[in-house]
Image (spheres, grey):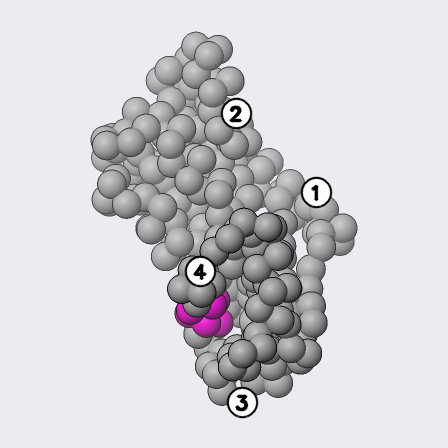
Amino acid sequence: MYKLLIVEDDPKLAALLQSHIQRYGNEAVLVQDFEHVLEQFQDIRPHMVLLDVNLPSYDGYYWCRQIRSISTCPILFISARDGMPDQLRALESGADDYITKPFHYDMVIAKIHSQLRRSYGDYATSSQERRVEKEGLVLFPERMEMGLGNRSVALTQKETILLETLLSRSPRLVSRERILEKLWDDTFVDDNTLSVNITRVRKRLAELGIQNALETVRGSGYRLNVVWKDR
């Protein structure tokens, strides 16, 4: 079963889309707070997003770019704006497809299933997808996602880079200088900025049930232990 997030401020249309999607055995969640779409995306971690253009506060193009900054999941625009510039802008913002209203629900379902197959099913290129794995903890850098057992968590770009750096060298120590080089090249950043990112990574690990795995080696760097004492 796949989980879809519907970002549509017309409650009647949103409910109909939800009904049709769930009729085919998938789960559909409706966004309730249109000022905090990205936070709801991170909480729900959907496999796919259905996104309208005309939304309160920020338009769909804005939210598409925000989602794309942390995820490569399929994004399908559904909008009454049928002009070519609108469709091009959606694709340039990171969308995978665009359907104009009014539409036939069977076509929407067919488009949804097509995108899901390409990303996760029969046509997915998962066998070619890069992955970093240690002791059951799997990081998918291109997907910006990490999983352990039946749990998964979405990551930001910085979190992905930091985790890949630590996980690929685990259980060896990674120096602070090495991490700074990976995250910010030659740009100067203070210790607090690095500490904030380390804290975020610890939080992501905790969301998977992993505690006390990321060790700070004072004056040297960080070490990610791959034998989890607490799951």
Could you say where residue 53 lies in the image, as x and y percent from the top left?
35, 25
CA distance for labels 1 and 3: 38 Å
- Helix, strand or loop under label 3: loop
In the picture, residue 171 is in which quadrant? bottom right
**Label 4 close to label 3 by CB (< 8 Å):** no
Name the amino acid, label 3.
Lys
Could you say where residue 136 lies in the image, as x and y percent from the top left?
64, 75
**Label 3 close to label 2 by CB (< 8 Å):** no
* Residue denoted by label 2: 92
Q: Which mark is residue 123?
A: 1
* Residue denoted by label 4: 190
Name the amino acid, label 1.
Tyr
| Farthest bottom residue in view | 229
Task: Report the span colored magenta.
Answer: 197-205
Which one is nearer the viewer's eye here, 224 or 210? 224
Q: Is residue 111 left or right of residue 3?
A: right
CA distance for labels 3 and 2: 45 Å
- Helix, strand or loop under label 4: loop
Which circle's residue, 4 or 3, is located before the other in the chain? 4
Q: Does any portion of residue 26 appear in the rendered image?
A: no
| Front disc: 1 or 4 | 4
Which one is nearer the viewer's eye here, 31 or 230? 230
Q: Which mark is residue 229?
A: 3
- Dot 3, crowdedness within 10 Å: few (<14), some or many (≥20)? few
Look at the image and say whether residue 200 sits in the magenta stretch: yes
| Front disc: 1 or 3 | 3
CA distance for labels 4 and 3: 32 Å
Q: Which mark is residue 29?
A: none
